[in-house]
Amino acid sequence: MSIDSKTNWKPRIVVLTCNWCSYATVDLAGLKHLEYPADVQLMIVKCSGQMDPSFIIEVFRNCADGILVAGCTDKDCYLGPDYMYDHAKHDQIKEFLVQAGIEEDRYQSAWGPKSSGPYFQKTLKNLVEQVWQLGALTGHGEIKLSSPPSETLC
């Protein structure tokens, strides 16, 4: 995708966080006054590890310049070990994003325990820095999908 050269541009970063553990991590980071970009949009999902990959594509297609998927470890998962993060699935998502014309560095995933506020902060700052370097993702609606978008998500 091409880069938008507007000087007043700010990256649109979406954090997809599970309702149980990783949302608590984000909340803990805020309570500990850990600094991370304020213009990040949180979207809470039931389970980050079992999220449909097409949802990530939809978020990019509708609004995001970068996405962080935050989830819990199998030991902390409220829903149990069957819902644990699947490394292969997220590697496939990155491959699909590249095929769709989206730079791989615009997507990251972070999997940690409830108490990992500093890890979340570091991962999010890293994503924001990478997206700043890449610039705005233009042509959101031009991302090719096998099915039409269901609704506007952002």
Image (spheres, rainbow, N blue to C red):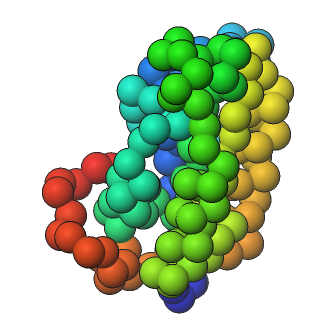
Would residue 120 appear left or right of 79 to someone viewing this image? right
Q: Which residue lies at the image location 53% right of the left edge and 88% below the top edge?
A: 2
Tell which of 76 and 25 is nearer to you: 76
Can residue 127 be seen in this snapshot? Answer: yes
Would residue 150 appear left or right of 55 to someone viewing this image? left
The quadrant in which residue 80 appears is top right
Question: Is 113 located above or below residue 52 in the figure?
Answer: above
Image location (x, y in percent) of residue 16: 49, 40
Would residue 85 appear left or right of 41 to someone viewing this image? right
Q: Residue furthest front?
A: 82
The quadrant in which residue 3 appears is bottom right
Question: Is 93 located above or below residue 50 in the figure?
Answer: below
Q: Which residue lies at the image location 70% right of the left edge and 16% below the top edge?
A: 75
Tell which of 37 and 26 is nearer to you: 26
Q: How many marks?
A: 0
Can residue 11 be seen in this snapshot? Answer: no
Question: Is 57 located above or below residue 37 in the figure?
Answer: below
Image location (x, y in percent) of residue 136: 54, 73
Question: Is 78 located above or below residue 107 in the figure?
Answer: above
Image location (x, y in percent) of residue 107: 61, 59
Q: Which residue lies at the image location 28% right of the left edge and 50% below the top edge?
A: 153
Image location (x, y in percent) of residue 148: 18, 69
Q: Which residue lies at the image location 69% right of the left edge and 40% below the top edge?
A: 110
Tell which of 30 and 9 is nearer to you: 30
